């Protein structure tokens, strides 16, 4: 397994649709998406299921998956190349450094599907919907841009709604669904399919931060 990971890490350095945040060019974002293209970001993208689905459905949009795990990114990036998705890119970076790699006002939507809820109180500031992260996202969004959260953890939903209010944002919409209730056109990650199969309620919220 270690050998396989090493090969994947090496392959990442040769992929045109992968950017390593530790050594990327300052203008990489413009090179990938131009100066005007609308961009959708998936945070903690893993294998990039949501990023790939968005890229297939909306070829007019740029789609960017962000994750620090190179082995997982390799799978999404390989699938994008195999499918000829020229609008899908992947950034290897911690979310904490997102604002160092993306210019302000270029993002239409930020998707956070099934993040680690980090339930312990001492972990709160590390949640991707905590106030420090929301304040990082806000300058990246275009006017009217939105943050989308999907989770099976109702406590994380409550936490996110409170955090959004503390930064002056507001709830735009939401839905609570179970297996069979969901919109058939919605993008579902492997986590969502697994949780729905267990009968869990899935919570979706859309927030405006501007």
Image (tube, rainbow, N blue to C red):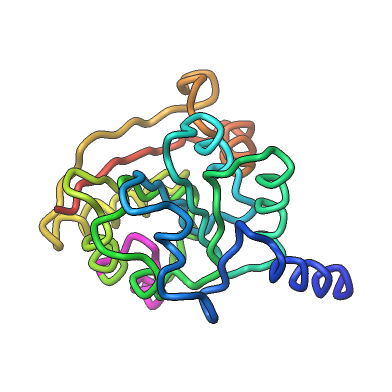
Is residue 125 rendered magenta in the image?
yes
The percent coordinates of residue 174 (x first, y second) are: 29, 34
The percent coordinates of residue 62 (x first, y second) are: 44, 45
Q: Quadrant of residue 179?
A: top right
Instruction: Work out whether residue 107 or residue 35 is closer to the camera in this orientation and state it.
Output: 35
Most common SS among magenta residues: helix
The percent coordinates of residue 89 (x first, y second) are: 55, 54
Viewed as shown, does residue 75 lie left or right of 66? right
The percent coordinates of residue 80 (x first, y second) are: 66, 45
At 74% from the left and 42% from the top, the residue drawn is 82
At 77% from the left and 67% from the top, the residue drawn is 11
Residue range (magenta): 121-131
Q: Relative to 1, does residue 171 appear above or below in the rendering?
A: above
At 41% from the left and 75% from the top, the residue drawn is 26
Q: Relative to 36, does residue 9 appear above or below in the rendering?
A: below
Q: Relative to 13, does residue 206 appear above or below in the rendering?
A: above
Is residue 46 rendered magenta in the image?
no
Q: Relative to 64, does residue 53 appear above or below in the rendering?
A: above
């Amino acid at each position: 397994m270690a050998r396989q990971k090493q090969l994947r890490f090496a392959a990442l350095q040769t992929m045109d649709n992968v950017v390593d945040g530790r050594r990327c060019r300052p203008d990489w974002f413009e090179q990938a998406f131009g100066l005007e293209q609308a961009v959708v970001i998936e945070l903690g993208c893993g294998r990039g299921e949501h990023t790939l689905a968005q890229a297939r459905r909306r070829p007019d949009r740029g789609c960017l998956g962000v994750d620090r795990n190179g082995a997982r990114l390799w799978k999404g990036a390989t699938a994008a190349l195999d499918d000829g998705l020229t609008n899908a890119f992947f950034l290897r970076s911690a979310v904490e450094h997102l604002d160092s790699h993306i210019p302000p006002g270029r993002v239409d939507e930020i998707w956070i599907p099934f993040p680690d809820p980090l339930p312990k109180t001492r972990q709160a500031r590390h949640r991707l919907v905590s106030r420090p992260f929301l304040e990082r996202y806000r300058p990246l969004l275009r006017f009217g841009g939105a943050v989308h959260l999907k989770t099976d953890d109702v406590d994380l939903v409550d936490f996110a709604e409170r955090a959004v209010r503390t930064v002056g944002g507001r709830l735009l919409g939401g839905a609570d669904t179970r297996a069979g209730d969901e919109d058939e056109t919605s993008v579902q990650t492997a986590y969502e399919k697994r949780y729905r199969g267990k009968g869990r309620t899935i919570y979706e919220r859309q927030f405006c931060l501007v």
